[in-house]
């Protein structure tokens, strides 16, 4: 058996059903081995899309998504997407072919320091050195991706390692236990210490990091909030405390006197835990699975008197233990926080755009009604100002956004992987026109893979987020370079075999959304919108 067969069979043992891939010389043995191992290949049109798809798969299933890329430039193309997965704490395996070990340092075709290139953007990066060890290498990478704070892991696959023959009897495939991780336990004593601090606080908050932005994480936070009466929120937006989907959260945050950071870094998203975003006297309990993150939290918080408690903890274990031991309490504070998070300007319920250009809130209203009628929905939101409007106006039980990385462009690959992970769900992506351009060729992948979703492009013919910066910082007379054309992105989707419609009136949106969903194809609604700054929901 070849190393490639050992790898493909080990992937199947881990429960992997498909790999997101773009072919290339170095990895063709794995394509061949995938036939016998029963692995489906979702063949994409750009390597970064494969990594974004693996990212979405990880967020939706909790198990690492697998991207399989070719060596050199193929690998390099995919690397940028690792940053989004790392910041969103998404379990992912990047497997890239590499030049043969035997040709290293001799000028091999596409020889590149691939592990070194990936290293800053992953939890671990290493290269397989023997075919016999491939199953163990894969299991190790898998466990690393899932353990503690999840994230991407890189495993390099030199061509001669994939082609080398091994004696199967001498190298057994990993069993299920090899892929399992044990969470860091959170004992009753630690939980009681946290609960005692919480009982003394008047305006406590629990803030969770991006790893709890998943369905499982949101359910854990709802259970924790229900058991303790303490508001528990997930922060996963690059806009941090001004996350538009958290309404006027920044106002209540400034009043908190104790914040439990549940695998949530007190980083730029939380203004480094300093005043005025947080009260100068606010204290913190830091529970984090990563010793380095604990150290950084202490450094950011600064004054040791503000650090009530810090402990190594798995956030899910801690949430469950705290919920199990808490005595329920109700407070006006919880109601105030909930009202702040729900707060949206009343005008958004009725506002309409100009002829030929919808107001983003008008678009959001129609999309929300469409999603509310779907039995199961996954919302993807991405882009600049329109992405912020989308997140402020539209919600769904399951949501994927670009996350703290703040990198635009992942929406279409996310939507495609979401349909694969949730075949029965209505998958709807809201994205800006600039954002659409990054991975529009993935409509072709979606058509070939028979993955239907609806993408709604808020088209303001502009890289508006940057245009708005120009207007604010330099004035309208010096705004240059951020214009786009009013391109018919619906026609792009249709040309690639999908369903496309151009919708200029709010009244036409419900029927267009229904037709797009009923088409059974990957669909794009191109909707001209007004060029507005991101919403201010703090009123
Ligand atoms: C990968 C990446 N490149 C560039 C940026 C900078 N950026 C943020 S928003 C934005 C404009 C996005 O335009 P569009 O998707 O059309 O949304 P709009 O702001 O127009 O609503 C740009 C260029 C980024 N965040 N990520």
Image (tube, rainbow, N blue to C red):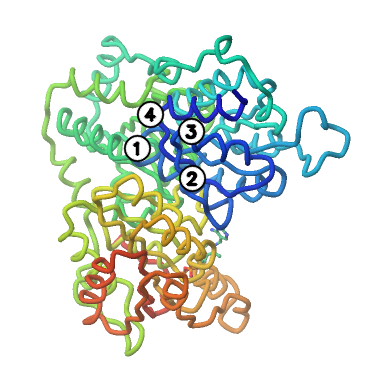
Mark 2 or mark 1: whose residue is earlier in sequence: 2
Q: Position of residue 246 (x, y in %)?
A: 30, 52
According to the image, label 1 marks what residue?
61
Q: Give the mark nearest the N terminus, 4 or 1.
A: 1
Of badges 3 and 2, the one in the foreground is: 3
Identify the residue under disc 2: 41
Does residue 46 lie above or below 58 as drawn? below
Identify residue for label 3. Answer: 36
Instruction: Give the secondary structure at mark 4.
Output: strand
Q: Is mark 2 within 8 Å of ligand 1?
A: no
Q: SS for tag 2?
A: strand
Give the residue displayed 35% in from the left and 41% down from the top: 60
Q: Which residue is mark 4?
A: 284
Q: Secondary structure at mark 1?
A: helix
Q: Which badge, 4 or 2, is on the more N-terminal residue?
A: 2
Residue 502 position, x and y percent, is 36, 81
Q: Quadrant of the N terminus?
A: top right
Name, please, the residue furthest toward the right: 106
Earlier-in-chain disc, 3 versus 2: 3
Instruction: Give the alpha-carbon distance from disc 4 to disc 2, as whole Å.
Output: 46 Å
Q: Are marks 3 and 2 in contact (CB under 8 Å)?
A: no
């Amino acid at each position: 058996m070849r190393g490639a067969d050992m790898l493909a069979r080990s992937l199947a043992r881990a429960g992997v059903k498909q790999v997101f891939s773009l072919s290339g010389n170095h990895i063709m043995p794995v394509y061949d081995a995938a036939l016998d191992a029963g692995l489906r290949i979702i063949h994409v049109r750009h390597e970064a899309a494969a990594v974004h798809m693996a990212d979405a798969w990880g967020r939706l299933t909790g198990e690492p998504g697998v991207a399989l890329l070719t060596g050199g430039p193929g690998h390099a193309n995919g690397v940028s997407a690792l940053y989004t997965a790392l910041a969103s704490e998404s379990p992912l395996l990047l497997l890239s072919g590499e030049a043969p070990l035997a040709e290293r340092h001799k000028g091999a075709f596409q020889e590149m320091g691939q592990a070194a290139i990936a290293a800053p953007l992953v939890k671990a990066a290493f290269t397989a050195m023997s075919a016999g060890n491939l199953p163990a290498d894969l299991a190790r990478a898998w466990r690393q991706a899932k353990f503690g704070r999840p994230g991407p892991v890189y495993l390099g696959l030199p061509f001669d390692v994939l082609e080398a023959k091994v004696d199967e009897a001498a190298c057994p495939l990993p069993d299920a236990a090899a892929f399992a991780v044990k969470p860091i336990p959170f004992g009753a004593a630690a939980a009681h210490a946290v609960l005692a601090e919480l009982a003394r606080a008047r305006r406590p908050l629990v803030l969770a990091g991006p790893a709890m932005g998943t369905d499982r994480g949101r359910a854990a936070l709802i259970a924790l909030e229900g058991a303790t009466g303490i508001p528990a929120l997930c922060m996963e937006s690059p806009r941090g405390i001004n996350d538009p989907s958290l309404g006027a959260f920044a106002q209540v945050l400034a009043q908190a006197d104790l914040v439990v950071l549940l695998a949530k870094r007190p980083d730029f998203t939380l203004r480094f835990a300093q005043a005025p975003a947080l009260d100068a006297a606010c204290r913190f309990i830091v529970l984090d699975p990563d010793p380095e993150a604990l150290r950084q939290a202490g450094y950011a918080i600064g004054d040791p008197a503000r650090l009530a408690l810090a402990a190594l903890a798995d956030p899910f274990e801690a949430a469950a233990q705290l919920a199990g031991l808490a005595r329920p309490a109700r407070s006006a504070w919880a109601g105030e926080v909930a009202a702040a998070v729900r707060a949206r300007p009343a005008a958004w319920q009725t506002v309409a755009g100009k002829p030929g250009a919808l107001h983003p809130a008008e678009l959001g209203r129609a999309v929300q009604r469409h999603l509310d009628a779907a039995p199961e929905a996954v919302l993807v939101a991405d882009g600049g100002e329109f992405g912020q409007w989308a997140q402020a106006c539209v919600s769904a039980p399951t949501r994927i956004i670009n996350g703290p990385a703040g990198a635009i462009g992942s929406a279409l690959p996310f939507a495609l992987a979401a349909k694969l992970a949730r075949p029965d769900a209505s998958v709807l992506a809201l994205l800006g026109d600039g954002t659409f351009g990054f991975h529009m060729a993935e409509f072709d992948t979606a058509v070939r893979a028979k993955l239907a979703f609806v993408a709604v492009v808020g088209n303001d013919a502009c890289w508006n987020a940057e245009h708005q910066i120009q207007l604010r910082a330099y004035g309208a007379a010096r705004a240059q370079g951020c214009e786009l054309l009013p391109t018919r992105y619906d026609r792009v989707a249709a040309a690639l075999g999908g369903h496309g419609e151009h919708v200029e009136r709010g009244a036409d949106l419900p029927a267009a959304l229904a037709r797009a969903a009923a088409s059974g194809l990957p669909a794009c609604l191109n909707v001209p919108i007004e060029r507005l700054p991101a919403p201010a929901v703090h009123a």
